[in-house]
Amino acid sequence: MRFKLIIAFVEDDRTDAVLEAARDAGATGSTIINNARGEGLNKKRTFFGLSLETQRDVLLFLVEEHLSRHILETIEQAGGFEANSSAGIAIQIDVEDAVGVSHQIEELSSKIEDEL
């Protein structure tokens, strides 16, 4: 079984919605890194040296490759990434190998067989 890693940078108030949408789309879990900061195309505003930007969460999803595009698109919709340029981004990369996922492979195998 082959996997992809989806990395989503999400405004912290949208994290729960993105997590729920990803699970509904087939993700079996996620790792969340809280309080990340970033800077996009336009520099963020400050007020007396204090940043006015919202905090972001980094969500990591290890997903089966046949489900990855659907999950990625679902994350985009739940996060509103295309509707608002500063809402967040999500990317997917190939995973060469993974350990510790044997318990997920059983569940995913039957789901993938149904999809194909």
Image: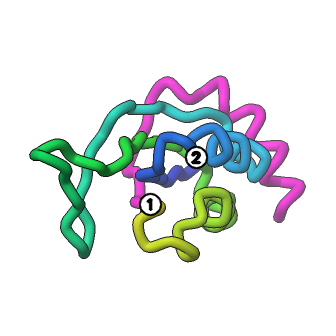
Q: Which residue is mark 2?
A: 14
Query: Of the residues shown, which amino acid type is indicated by label 1?
Result: Gly
Residue extending furthest toward the front: 48
The answer to whether residue 90 is visible is no
Local secondary structure at mark 1:
strand
Local secondary structure at mark 2:
helix
Residue extending furthest toward the right: 114
Give the residue drawn at x 51%, y 71%.
Answer: 84
Coordinates of residue 99 in the picture (x, y in percent) = 45, 29
Whether pointer 2 and pointer 1 mark residues with C-beta atoms closer than 8 Å, the reply is yes
Q: Which residue is mark 1?
A: 88
The answer to whether residue 16 is visible is yes
Coordinates of residue 83 in the picture (x, y in percent) = 57, 75
Query: Of the residues shown, which amino acid type is indicated by label 2?
Result: Arg
Give the residue drawn at x 12%, y 46%.
Answer: 48
Coordinates of residue 70 in the picture (x, y in percent) = 69, 65
Q: Quadrant of the C terminus?
A: bottom right
Between 54 and 32, the one nearer to me in the picture: 54
Q: Which residues are magenta?
A: 93-116
**Would residue 92 appear left or right of 76 to someone viewing this image?**
left
Coordinates of residue 115 in the picture (x, y in percent) = 84, 60
Q: Is residue 1 above or below residue 106?
A: below
Check if residue 113 falls in the magenta segment.
Answer: yes
Check if residue 95 falls in the magenta segment.
Answer: yes
> Distance between the Cα atoms at labels 2 and 1?
10 Å
Q: Earlier in the sequence, mark 2 or mark 1?
A: 2
Quarter of the figure with residue 98 = top left
Between 72 and 48, the one nearer to me in the picture: 48
**Would residue 9 appear left or right of 108 to someone viewing this image?**
left
Give the residue drawn at x 59%, y 58%.
Answer: 79
Q: Is residue 85 above or below residue 105?
A: below
